[in-house]
């Protein structure tokens, strides 16, 4: 297993080789996920449970808030399996869950679940109604006050329909987004997504500032993560891997817009984005083109892991583009790469979860 | 490799995944081991050396106080091999030896050997003559003052004939013990053990309080460990894995009896017991039934490791029930499970010690 460099140099990730990592999972629900067929990341009608179930499986390898582990209609297993498998083979120093607006709390003991008193956001086509400034500031503060328990932090996310809100967010902030955003669908349901995003854009007034736009058409995870990025850049001791694809790119674009308004600069030397091969090679999106719109430089990497060593039909769906990212699996796979995890062993471990 | 939950939920052990551990070995001699054929955990006539030799092998992979590593008459190798193998594949942060009454000090440099000024106890069928209150208080104090050098502590033991003293202790404290205690013998030498335990019980007067009973029929390790458990519950920062089977269960029962007399409560959320598959599946004992007699809840786990991947006859004796626990091997195996150690690799490592 290895990784490819999307932007920047190998040095950042190489210098993390062998170091210990904490895994933080940003979890949030946007009611955008209730729009029929908007996402396949979860169980139809129960997509709001996806981040809850992902948290449970990642921490304790059990799905407690539902009988069966979240599967998409076509039976694509949640990427939580990948992150969990990495954790079993080369454990993170600790896992913590950030509740940025869950409908149901994960049923786990001992693991830290941070409560930010943030509610699930509304659907973006009806106005998400987020107090964006408050959520952003909570992200800044969390990064500023985070106690280090290991050498660096991997920040993943689980937000059903999160690629839609990431897309609308970047578009609302004026970035070029055409054909650059991925979806967890192979054949991206452009009609529904496009319709939803267009409805969201219609809510934006020209005079809306950054936070007003975010309040209407973003999600809590994206805004909080942007705050986290900016809060972390003020610390010399905090190294952050944003584990995700186009959603994490969108969080960086938010940070970029905020810093442009504020007139400051982002010292991004201690931040990187790590994603999957499935995102990097996705023909329906372009993570690199998204990141190149940042006014600061960013190191970005993609794991080279795929399911070429597996014959399990459910896992093969990843290689066929049915699922690409989530639950920080891209970051987890890069972490596995720089910690000597073997591809065959990892494949076997993931397969073992499927029975 | 994985683990099974005997009591409680997976959460406690799961949240220790990837965290660092210190290994403390409680070592003690009870002259009960001089009763002929009472135990096979060591060399006949030299059973008192077993904890000394186990300490040496665990720390430095050499047996310095005797020519050959402790073997039972049938050639069952000490479980110190298992704990040592885990330590080589996924090292503990540090190993320390607690001298709770050794006949001979282990010949090791650099490793901390805590001296508690406790003498080897006498045989329980002649009155063990332990200052139980003092030993207990030393355990409490040690836990209260222990400086943390890692994320949690694994507490193992090496006490020849320790299952006999554990059995008599629980019986003397009024617990139901019939058929619940294991032995390191496959065909538990019930005549000798039963006779010894009955003789010990005859020393107990009805009016004897908990400490008086412990003084007569227990051993230093059990009493000290009970104190350690109670001392650790007063700290929020100390997480403890009791690594052992029915002996560690007996130590918990002592803590339970003491707290009942004192009228307090045990907050056991930061304590767990971890043992082996051989104990968990032992038909001649019942660790779960012992733990269910506690008035507080306890998380308890059993490793699923066995020697099914080995063809070494000496190791196969474990799977045949000839040996089941000791030197914290159950805790070490659970630690291996949550740190990504591979079963085949561990099997090979253990085999390598046998030549």
Image (spheres, coloured by chain):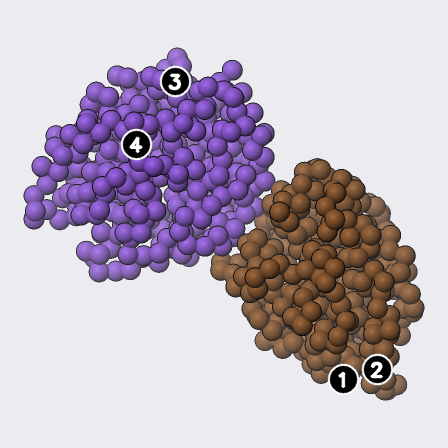
Chain colours: A brown, B purple
For disc 1, the marked residue is A126
Q: Which mark is residue B145?
A: none
Residue drawn at (31%, 38%), measured in percent from left and top? B285
Residue drawn at (56%, 33%), measured in percent from left and top? B343
> In the picture provided, is A84 more to the left or to the right than A318?
left
* Quarter of the figure with residue B342: top right
Q: Secondary structure at mark 1?
A: helix
In the rendered image, residue A191, in percent from the top left (x then y), is placed at: 87, 73
In the rendered image, residue A12, in percent from the top left (x then y), is placed at: 77, 48
Packing grade of label 4 (10 A; few <14, some 14-19, many >=20) is many
* Quarter of the figure with residue A47: bottom right
In the rendered image, residue B141, in percent from the top left (x then y), is placed at: 31, 47
Q: Are marks 2 and 1 in contact (CB under 8 Å)?
A: yes
Tell me the chain of label 2.
A
Packing grade of label 1 (10 A; few <14, some 14-19, many >=20) is some
- Cα distance in 3D space between marks 4 and 2: 72 Å
For disc 4, the marked residue is B183
Q: If you read the primary sequence from the N terminus, does the residue marked by circle 3 or circle 4 appear first?
A: 3
For disc 3, the marked residue is B75
- Cα distance in 3D space between marks 3 and 4: 16 Å
Tell me the chain of label 4.
B
Q: Viewer-proximal residue, B38 or A96?
A: B38
> In the picture provided, is B267 more to the left or to the right than A13?
left
Q: Viewer-proximal residue, A33 or B80?
A: A33
Q: Secondary structure at mark 2?
A: helix
Work out whether A114 lies above or below B292.
Answer: below
Q: Viewer-proximal residue, B136 or B170?
A: B170
């Amino acid at each position: 297993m290895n990784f490819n460099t999307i932007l920047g140099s190998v040095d950042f990730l190489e210098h993390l080789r062998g170091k210990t990592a904490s895994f933080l999972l940003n979890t949030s629900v946007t009611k955008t996920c209730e729009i029929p067929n908007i996402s396949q990341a979860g169980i139809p009608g129960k997509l709001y449970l996806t981040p809850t179930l992902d948290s449970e499986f990642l921490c304790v390898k059990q799905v407690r808030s539902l009988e069966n582990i979240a599967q998409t209609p076509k039976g694509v297993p949640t990427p939580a399996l990948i992150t969990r498998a990495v954790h079993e083979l080369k454990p993170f120093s600790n896992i913590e869950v950030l509740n940025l607006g869950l409908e149901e709390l994960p049923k786990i003991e001992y693991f830290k679940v941070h409560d930010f008193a943030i509610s699930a956001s509304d659907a973006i086509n009806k106005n998400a109604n987020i107090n964006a400034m408050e959520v952003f500031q909570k992200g800044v503060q969390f990064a500023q006050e985070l106690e280090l328990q290991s050498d660096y932090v991997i920040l993943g996310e689980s937000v059903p329909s999160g690629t839609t809100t990431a897309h609308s967010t970047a578009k609302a902030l004026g970035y070029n987004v055409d054909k650059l955003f991925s979806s967890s669908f192979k054949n991206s349901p452009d009609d529904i997504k496009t319709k939803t995003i267009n409805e969201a854009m219609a809510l934006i007034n020209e005079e809306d500032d950054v936070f007003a736009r975010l309040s209407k058409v973003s999600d809590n995870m994206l805004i909080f993560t942007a705050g986290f990025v900016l809060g972390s850049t003020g610390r010399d001791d905090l190294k952050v891997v944003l584990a995700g694809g186009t959603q994490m790119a969108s969080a960086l674009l938010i940070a970029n817009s905020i810093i442009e308004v504020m007139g400051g600069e982002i010292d991004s030397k201690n931040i990187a984005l790590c994603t999957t091969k499935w995102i990097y090679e996705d023909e329906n999106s372009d993570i690199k083109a998204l990141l190149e719109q940042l006014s600061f430089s960013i190191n970005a990497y993609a794991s080279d892991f795929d399911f070429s060593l597996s014959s399990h039909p459910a896992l093969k769906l990843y290689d066929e583009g049915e699922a690409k990212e989530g639950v920080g699996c891209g970051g987890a796979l890069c972490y596995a790469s720089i910690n000597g995890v073997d591809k065959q062993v990892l494949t076997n471990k993931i397969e073992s979860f499927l029975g």
